[in-house]
Image (cartoon, rainbow, N blue to C red):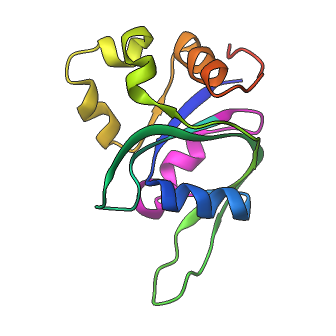
Amino acid sequence: MTGWLGVVSRTHVQRGVAGGFAQLCHGKAQPLRLMRAGDWLIYYSPTMEMGGEALRAFTAIGEVADDEVFKFDMGGGFVPFRRRVRYTTAREVPLADLKDSLDLCAQPNWGMALRRGHLLLTPRDFATIAHAMDVKVPLPA
């Protein structure tokens, strides 16, 4: 089991949670193909809406349900790739509450890493965030 971080606005996270899917990096397939069934995805939302008011919080967590990456036609010519995710009930946690205890934030230019939109979490960071979100999950390998 591996823990991943996806960077998506809260509005888009909520859409994914309601629909049981993950969509990352403006619909690109590659980030989704890196994950495997049984991996876990935590969402960090820098904003409420894309380009909107700042939020800076961990907003959802779920387990990747299978190994299928599929296209979904959203209309208007936009056909992003998605993965099925089983989300669990979790509380939102502001980044400020955890920043001093995360390996991710100890790295120089850590904010730039978030701009990639999808990254591997250290097992320690994954466990720290999941615990703060009141979610009991298996520890990553």
The residue under the point 53% across, 88% down is 75
Residue 17, given in percent of the width and then of the height, sits at 67, 56
Q: How many marks?
A: 0
Is 74 situated above or below 14?
Answer: below
Along the line of sight, which residue is nearer the eye, 38 or 46? 46
Start-end of magenta stretch: 23-40
Q: Is residue 81 left or right of residue 111?
A: right
Q: Residue 54 colored magenta?
A: no
Q: Is residue 21 visible?
A: no
Residue 40, given in percent of the width and then of the height, sits at 67, 33
Residue 107, given in percent of the width and then of the height, sits at 28, 14
Q: Give the quadrant of the N terminus.
A: top right
The residue under the point 41% across, 28% down is 95
Q: Is residue 12 visible?
A: yes
The residue under the point 56% across, 32% down is 4
Residue 129, given in percent of the width and then of the height, sits at 57, 22
Looking at this view, name the residue that lies furthest to the bottom: 76
Looking at this view, name the residue that lies furthest to the left: 109
